[in-house]
Image (cartoon, rainbow, N blue to C red):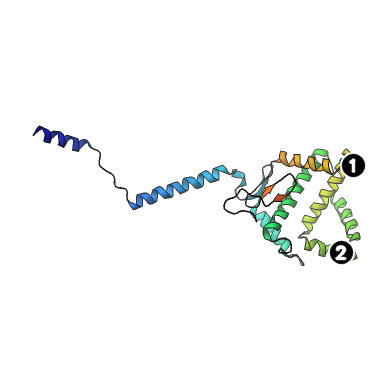
Amino acid sequence: MRAGIVRSAVAETRAPTKRITVSTIRRIVIASLAAASALALTACDSEQIGSAVVIDGDRFTVDDLQNQVERAQRLEGFDVEAAGGMPAFQRTVLTRHIQHEIFLRLAEDEDIQVSEADIDDAIEGISAQAPGGDLDAALAQAGYTEDAFRAGVADQLIAQAFAEENGADNAALTETLVDLGNELGVEVNPRYGTWGDDLAVSADTGSISEPAS
């Protein structure tokens, strides 16, 4: 009788056994995947989400990049495949954008002034050297919109002014631009590649989901 009472008491104090159902397992898996996704996003700079590149905290978004690519594609005579394919051309557009931002910072630091009139004069000189004085075909083939070309000309004028004022050769200019890029904290979205000391976006990528090609 006493043994029966003891067994009964043990049975009453023992915690009930929980059944692990299929729905419970499903909830655990979903929660784990959500946690993994959150961890992956946390590992990325929050500013970089939705950005093609972040420069000094300023976002050049994926939409911005796509808009510039689409404008180039509308140029008569432009062939994206001849330009190396879409991923390569996206890197080209990003490279031009990043370089321009670095040159603008160089101009600011060195108090170099380049006016729209200066750019117009430079373009006039370049056009005079083009066959028939028409640059449009060559620019379209390279995927240069008018805005992109004017930005590139401005960059060259800034480079020339910097070289004249500082007696800098190409190596010194490149070193200065690389240092400025580091100061600006250029962060390219890994899906497009990486920014390097060659002042260009390369196809190397740390993305495991959409590697650059």
Q: Is residue 141 above or below residue 202?
A: below
Query: Label 2 sits on what residue type?
Result: Asp
Q: Quadrant of residue 182?
A: top right
- Label 2 to label 1, Cα distance in Å? 30 Å
Question: Residue 20: x and y, percent?
Answer: 32, 48
Give the number of the disc on residue 134.
Answer: 2
Confirm or deny contact between disc 2 and disc 1 (CB under 8 A).
Answer: no
Q: Is residue 114 visible?
A: no
Residue at figure coordinates x 71%, y 64% from the top left: 81
Residue at figure coordinates x 83%, y 39% from the top left: 110
At label 2, counting other C-alpha atoms closer than 10 Å, the crowd grade (few under 14, some 14-19, many 20 or more) is: few
* Residue that mark 1 sits on: 164
Question: Residue 66: x and y, percent?
Answer: 67, 57
> Considering only order in the chain, which callout, 1 or 2, is on the residue closer to the N terminus?
2
Q: Nearer the viewer, residue 47 or 2?
A: 2
Query: Label 1 sits on what residue type?
Result: Glu
Residue at figure coordinates x 37%, y 50% from the top left: 25
Which residue is the extreme one toward the top?
2
Residue at figure coordinates x 53%, y 45% from the top left: 40
Q: Nearer the viewer, residue 72 or 115?
A: 72
Quadrant placement of the N terminus: top left
Q: Nearer the viewer, residue 56 or 117?
A: 56
